[in-house]
Image (spheres, coloured by chain):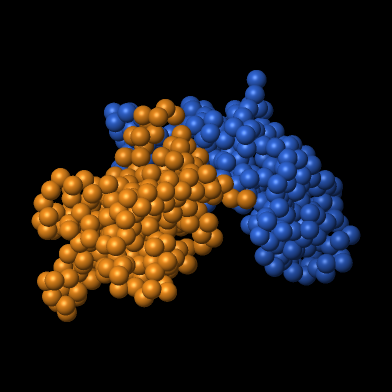
Chain colours: A orange, B blue
Amino acid sequence: MKVLQNVKAVFVLAYMFSILWVVRNLLSLIYLFFAPFTVLFLLYAMVGSEVLPYALVGAYIMTIVQAGSDIVGDAAWHKLELKFQDMMVASPVSETAYMLAEALSELLYASPALLILSIFIYQIKPSLVTLGTIFSITLLLWLSTSALGFFISTYMPNLRNAWQISLLLGFILAVLPPVFYPIEHIPEPLLWLAYVPPTTHAAIILRDSIGLTSTMNIAYSWLILIAYTVAFLLLASYRAQWREK
Amino acid sequence: MAEIFECRNLTKIYKSSEKRGLENVSFRMPSRGILTLLGRNGAGKTTLLRIATTQLLPTSGSVTVLGLDVVSEAKKVRERISVLPQEGRPFPPLTPWDHIYYTLLARGLSRAEAKARAKRVLEDLDLVEYAKVAADKLSGGLRQRTLLAMVLSTYAELVFLDEPTLGVDAVTQRKIWSLIKDYCKKYGSVVLTTNSISEAEVLSDYIVVLNRGRVVAQGTVDDLRAMLPYRFRVDVSEGFSKEELLSYGKVVVVAGRMRVLLDDEADARELALDAVKRRVSASVSPATLEDIFIDLVQEGGG
């Protein structure tokens, strides 16, 4: 199958998994709005407007992470329950195209929430840098978390635990690290641990673009985030289990 | 010319359980037609099908599909096949039309061609009135037909159907049989798995009987019939002990009734007459593929 046909397959399958799904089942949108906006609302209600920039950045990153980590459950469901992946493996659609379709579908699904949150973030410091940063962070974080999520999903032996793994991944990447709060809040002995997740660096970069500077060098954060993205994409491309052993 | 489908000394040992799924399986499907993998549950049919459709790696041996090796030439194989997995399910809120049309688009068809094929297959499978109904509102049989429609609309050179009539009613089953035969005439070959003897008998050009991961028989329906050393069967419900019946031929118990398999027509008549004398019911009929199947899988230790 030619490259262009595979690109078409990515968009067709992503449309089928997300937009068509939402069109046929509008209530499913609630799920994606629920987590980030709940945290945003609670922080705003309990602490006040001074935490809003942090809360918005946190909610934005959490939404992208949720899109990536949801692949664990969704792709495992498509593979193990619906057996749709089996049908697609035995077809001209390439493995990479199928993986990208799963990832793109999650991004499309999350896009209404991301659009609203990005408008709020942009309003804090309207500039081309902010816009460019939002776009770049979205792309890098979406690619890295989706690749990681897809990689994990191919090793799920059953669906029972897929959703739990998905939630755990979201918790590890978007709740524990300094995504909703400044990295300076982490106690000194644990600081090294806070720098490990890619989401820490995504939050540092995004906050920096709206004037919330950090002690961390932004250039390092960009490099680390890019390195994570490349590593997770390679992991998913070469180590995802397409054929069971 | 390349074989349609061939397995050579195929063995599959599952790493996780060390269980042997397939053991030294060899057979070939030299020309276009319908090949049936017949066997009981757990016989290894789905394992074999998953290896052939590039979803599972074999432990040893080789499988070629349309002349291509399924391990080293998997990408080329995938471009020319289509598969109906066992117990697959459609996406709950999507309609049969969505499933067929969009998967055809994803396979590279143009919108016009995908639309035309989707319409045709919906008509062929009597799904027109359900075309716009969400899959979670369809019965199990209609869902199975939707999945089958997704596969049959691909016009792939070789389609693999894992228990295609699972969960459908008898009328639909016959409709599906005729569609599978029609597909084979018009578009390509079919490899299907089943544990239904009547399905295998009606559809198959070639049957491979699997039991506990091994091939216990293979050939056409006539070849398999010829393998059975019994031409007749006599069913008796009561009035005879097993020892008495063993003097006539091989005795198998089917649904609480004794079935005697024998080759001599005179012996069959004698047994029937004996039953009449004892005032118990008995029926005499020619041995069928079912008798051969039960004989084979029981002989094989199944």
Do we see residue B203 in this rendering?
no
Spot occupied by residue B29 in the image (x, y as percentages of width and height):
66, 32
Q: Quadrant of residue A149?
A: bottom left
Q: Residue at x 32, y 50 (%)?
A: A219
Residue lying at 34% horizontally and 73% vertically, measured from the top left: A186
Residue A52 appears at what percent x and percent y? 16, 68
Is A176 displayed left or right of B42 in the figure? left
Query: Which image quarter holds the N terminus of chain B?
Result: top right
Q: Residue furthest right?
A: B247
Q: Name the image quarter holding residue A202.
A: bottom left
Where A217 falls versus A10 (above or below)? below
In the rendered image, the quadrant that contains the C terminus of chain B is bottom right
Image coordinates of residue B188 in percent, x first then y, are: 52, 29
Q: Nearer the viewer, residue A39 or A193?
A: A193
Left or right relative to A187: residue A60? left
From the viewer's perspective, is A196 left or right of A28? Answer: right
Closer to the camera, A30 or A203? Answer: A203
* Relative to A137, B172 lies left or right: right
Query: Among all residues in the image, which is located at the extreme bottom?
Result: A46
> Outermost residue, top direction?
B1
Measuring 43% from the left and 34% from the top, which residue is drawn there? Answer: B154
Identify which residue is drawn at 43% across, 46% down: A230
